[in-house]
Amino acid sequence: MKKKKQQPEMSNAALVSDSLFDELVLMIEAARARAWQAVNFEMVSLYWNIGQWISGKMQEAAWGSKVVEKAAAYLAEKRPDLGGFSRRTLYRMAEFYNAYKDDEIVTPLVTQITWTNHLVILSRAKSPGERRFYLEKCAAEHCPKRDLERLFDSSYYERRRIGEAAPASALVTQTVRSFVPDVYALEFLDLPERHREATLRDAIVSHLRDFILELGKDFTFVGKEYPVKVGKSDFNIDLLFFNRSLRCFFAFELKTRKFRPSDIGQIDFYLETLDRDVRKPDENPSVGVILCTDKDDSVVEYALSRSMSPTMVASYQLVLPNKEILQNRLRQITELVLEENQISELPCSEEEEEPEPNET
């Protein structure tokens, strides 16, 4: 019987050379990323300038809207080698410029986003606020077109905005609220309607990239069934993440049923163990998210009213949410907030006004 030929062990010299070559790869990738950013900056800047030029000409009586057709015809006839400047494309560039020219916050972001993503946002966003939201997200997270379209399909903007107004414990800041949508769209898990918590947990970990897209790219995964020990007892947190910008842990407790007030005690306990035994001195208090199939906001508000931990409750769906329902709900919330602000700004009635002191 022939003996199996043993594979030679990796020498220290080989390990060193691999490390050296990895450094070379990083240099190449970094240079390519900078080159792509430079090309994208120049291209989007060009489209911005063309849009500005077209917009200006359209205001002139001599040209009006005909300038787009005349410009497209001229380029097609005189410079067919340029390409990519059809009547429709030139209109898009004018629309692009007009959409952002007066927004001082958004204007610096436009060159940080691909033209393809600009076209998606322009065609699908329904308001300046929604456009700004997706522009900021794309600039911060460098979303590819597929991810951006999925965010629109899942009504990500509406879900995040509704989440900002959802009930939460008093210790949850508005900044933290902005990271947690009211409804998580988990259609990518491809789970049956009836499933166990362990199945949900494993499916999320198996589709971690898509789940991170739901959370935001500032989140990093720490562990599944993360172990914590108190006294002689062992416990496990379903899913643990860390948010780099907020510098705090996010503990997710999964429930394949409707929210119950008793769930608060469990997540409070986990947050206490994280803050006492895991959190570092320079990190912020941990945040808890109870993720369930359904919730009654009134029950959630009552249950969280005396909670001493920064905790929120969100629901999840295994199909894409109904966009029209979410838009109507967001509209109602916006109208209610505006109404409350108007009431708070109303002057006192004559009976309520304090009498002015008599002049002497």
Image (cartoon, helix red, strand yellow):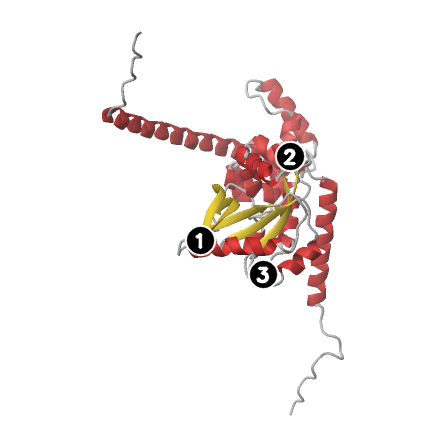
**Which percent across, then down, holds residue 81?**
55, 18
Residue where numbered disc 2 is placed: 187
Residue on which disc 3 sits: 307
Kindly state the secondary structure of the residue where label 2 is placed.
helix
Report the amino acid beneath label 1: Lys
Front residue of 282 and 83 = 282
Q: Please tell me whether mark 1 sits on a helix, a strand or a loop.
A: loop
Which residue is located at x 27 percent, y 23 percent?
A: 10
Q: Mark 2 or mark 1, which has the lower sequence index?
A: 2
Q: Of circles 2 and 1, which is in front?
A: 1
Q: Residues within 10 Å of mark 3 (few under 14, many from 20)?
A: some
**Coordinates of residue 316 in the picture (x, y in percent):** 65, 42
Residue under pointer 1: 232
Q: As rendered, which of 78 and 296 lies closer to the eye?
A: 296
Residue 294 location in percent, x, y?
A: 69, 46
Residue found 68% across the figure and 84% down from its top: 356
Q: The N terminus lies in which quarter of the figure?
A: top left
In the picture, measured across the screen, residue 37 lies left or right of residue 21, that is right
**Residue at coordinates 63% horizontally, 55% vertically from top-left?**
262
Could you tell whether 123 is left or right of 252 in the image? Answer: right
Earlier in the chain: of badge 2 and badge 3, it is: 2
State how far apart marks 2 and 3 are (Cα). Answer: 31 Å
The answer to which image quadrant residue 98 occupies is top right
Residue type at numbered disc 3: Ser
